[in-house]
Image (cartoon, grey):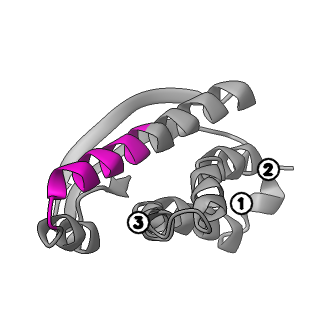
Amino acid sequence: MHYVFGLGIGYLVAHAPDPLPIFLTLLAIVALHEALHYVACRLLGLRTLCFAAKRTLFGIAIGLVVEYDDPKRFAIATLAPQIITVALLCLAPLDSTAIVLALAHLLVSGYDLAKVVETVKNGMWREGG
């Protein structure tokens, strides 16, 4: 799940001179992020069950629910959207806003990163082949 409009991003949007472009850009990044998860899952043969959205303490959480038996393929599909962070950082020399967007993307990717760390930490990485 990704905390789309959590504390940090909510603050960024609320304190911007014109929050609508920031809001729409972040929404587009999250949509692209989820689309990349979906494409990676399909390419890796992972079964995607559904998209889920719910309100949480930190904002709105959205995510793709995936069924997997191979932790390595799960980790690859989970980390695939980090190409967005890499692309934004490559744009940073041209526009400093890209750095802020890259950090925002990392922020909404926190759950993904935690799931990969949990998978490795629990030894499921070795069990998956």
Dot 2, how many residues are within 10 Å of its Cα: few (below 14), some (14-19), or many (20+)? few
Q: Which residue is mark 2?
A: 128
Hey, what amino acid is under mark 1? Answer: Met
The amino acid type found where label 2 is placed reads: Gly
Between marks 1 and 3 in the image, the one whose residue lies nearer the viewer = 3
* C-alpha distance separating marks 1 and 3: 29 Å
Indicate the position of residue 106 as horizontal and vertical percent values. 49, 66
For image coordinates 44% across by 62% down, the residue present is 101
Who comes first in sequence, dot 1 or dot 3?
Answer: 3
The Cα–Cα distance between marks 3 and 2, rounded to whole angstroms, is: 31 Å
User: Residue 27, position in %: x, y?
Assistant: 31, 45
Q: Residue at x 27, y 74 (%)?
A: 8
Q: Secondary structure at mark 1?
A: helix
From where the camera sits, is residue 23 visible? yes
**Image vertical order of residue 106 relative to residue 74, above or below:** below
State the SS at label 3: helix
Residue corresponding to mark 3: 104
Give the residue pinned by disc 1.
124
Magenta residues, as a range? 17-31
* Disc 2 to disc 1: CB gap under 8 Å: yes
Question: Depth check: 73 or 104 in front?
Answer: 104
- Could you tell me which residue is drawn at 50 percent across and 70 percent down? 99
**Label 2 to label 1: alpha-carbon separation:** 6 Å
Q: Secondary structure at mark 2?
A: loop
- The image shows residue 14, relative to residue 68, as above or below, that is below
